[in-house]
Amino acid sequence: MPTRPAYPIPKTTPFKVHIPDDDLQHLDTLLRMTPAAQLTYETSLPGNDRKFGMRQDWSKQVVAEWQSAFDWRKHETYINTFDHFHINIEDDLGNFHIHFVAMYSNRQDAVPLLVLHGWPGSFLELLPMLDKLRNKYSPDDLPYHLVVPSLPGYAFSSPPPSDRDFGIEDIARLMNQLMLNLGHGAGYIVQGGDVGSKVARVMVAKHEQCKVNFCIMENEPRQLETGSSYAIQHATKPATISLVLSSNPVALLAWLIQGTRRH
């Protein structure tokens, strides 16, 4: 495996996460203007049952807490305790501006490790892992060079092109190029969860620089029986669900949370 790339990390631009005040105010306005969903049998089963998905009482409680108690700036400060970068990747489909978090070791034998998030999620779901590693290791002891990107269309990375289909193989190609641009052409390991696991599988099959990918897990029966309907919607009618979710933050919240409670 290669040693650490020359510092500063080549071809990258450091940046800090900062959501403009106007955007936060706009979100607050949308939350205040969104009426509570109508109470139905499916949204109010006894015993806090979520058999049919998100409950109306839960939705009202969470939205109220979102407006009154959630402090984005506090979370933003924590997010910025990690090193964020943008890198431009030239591809046959155009130029892509890819965001990633990096944690590099000073060890010459450190192993480059690309860690890919899934859906519903983002690079944020991997920050606790980075937090544990930086608390456990110093840069002189850290056994990995860690790279945690935002997949295309997530967070601060460029969206997919709007004039053609864009699939797992396209994402895998961009993620491999990311690692090559960072100086890891001699080899790296990739690990992925959810969508990230599918990207990892293609990477190890298509790109020789990717040496190892993931551990195979058995399917969870309850997930297949009662928790996979969202995937059918995403696969067959992505345009419809994108219009619905982009119009209302409460709808987006319910859909994302449902995705984390798969059964």
Image: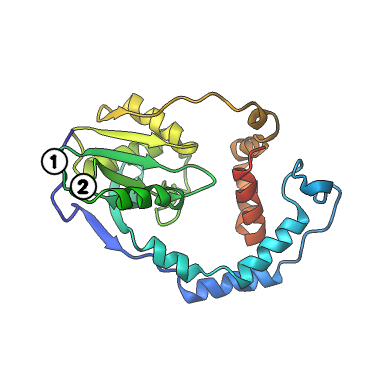
* Apparent side of residue 51 relative to residue 108 in the rendered image (left or right): right
Residue at (44, 33) in percent of width and height: 197
Q: Toward the viewer: 131 or 122?
A: 131
What coloring was used for the rendering?
rainbow
Which residue is disc 2 drawn over?
A: 105
Identity, as a three-letter code, of the amino acid under mark 2: Ser
Q: CA distance from mark 2 to mark 1?
A: 8 Å
Residue 248 visible at all:
no
Residue 149 in percent (x, y) is at 36, 48
Residue at (46, 49) in percent of width and height: 125
Residue at (39, 32) in percent of width and height: 200
Say above or below: 176 vs 63. Answer: above
Residue with the most extreme right position: 41
Which residue is disc 1 drawn over?
A: 108
Identity, as a three-letter code, of the amino acid under mark 1: Gln
* Apparent side of residue 19 relative to residue 253 in the rendered image (left or right): left
Q: Secondary structure at mark 1?
A: loop
In what quadrant of the picture does the N terminus appear? Answer: top left
